Image (tube, rainbow, N blue to C red):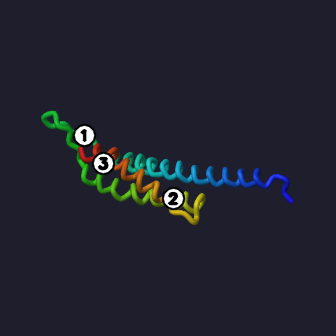
Amino acid sequence: MNPHPRLRLISRVWLVAIKYMLAIVGAISSVIGSGQLSNYMAELVRGKPSADVGVVIYSYSDRALILWLLTSPILSYTFLFIIQQTFSKNSNLPYWIGIITGILCLPYYLIPLLW
């Protein structure tokens, strides 16, 4: 017989809360990190800038945009899948947090690529 059943219940609640907090922080970090990695790859593909009458023109800006639009969701989903399988197998919390974070960060990544 456990002499402190309330203490055991409190510790279990704390562990579950920490597990969900790790899933949330991991989902946010994975979406932001995959966006940064995709943005870095797109910057490499975009090429060197050439200035014409004060307007900067990149050689392959359309290819960079397509690369970003393909790699960012693939990397995000892969990282979110790993987090979901690790921390919350029965919950879609990492996916929902990832979708919200991705929507909020979308202008931050796309505006420089479209510029």
**Which is nearer the eye, 102 or 19?**
19
Q: Nearer the viewer, mark 1 or mark 3?
A: 3
Q: Quadrant of residue 2?
A: bottom right
Q: Which residue is mark 3?
A: 110
Residue 111 rendering spot, x and y as whole percentages: 28, 45
Locate the C terminus and report the quarter of the image it occupies: top left
CB-based contact (under 8 Å), mark 2 and mark 1 = no
Dot 2: within a 10 Å radius of its alpha carbon, few (fewer than 14), some, or many (20 or more) residues? some
Front tag of 2 and 3 = 2
Residue 69 relative to residue 75: left or right: left
**Residue drawn 24% across and 53% down?**
62
Q: Which mark is residue 49?
A: 1
- Which element is circle 1 on? strand
As shown in the figure, which amino acid type bears the numbered disc 1? Pro
User: How far across and how far down the image is residue 30, in percent?
Assistant: 48, 51
The disc, 2 or 3, on the residue closer to the chain's N-terminal end is: 2
Q: Dot 3 lies on which element?
A: helix
Q: What residue does disc 2 label?
A: 93
Q: Position of residue 88 (x, y in %)?
A: 58, 60
Q: Secondary structure at mark 2?
A: helix
- How busy is the neighbourhood of tag 1: few (under 14 within 10 Å), some, or many (20 plus)? few
Q: CA distance from mark 1 to mark 3?
A: 18 Å
Q: CA distance from mark 2 to mark 3?
A: 25 Å
Circles 2 and 3: CB atoms closer than 8 Å = no
Amino acid type, label 2: Leu
- The amino acid beneath tag 3 is Leu
In the rendered image, residue 31, in percent from the top left (x then y), is placed at: 45, 51
Marks 1 and 3 close (CB-CB < 8 Å): no
Whether residue 24 sits left or right of residue 65 in the image: it is right
Q: CA distance from mark 2 to mark 1?
A: 41 Å
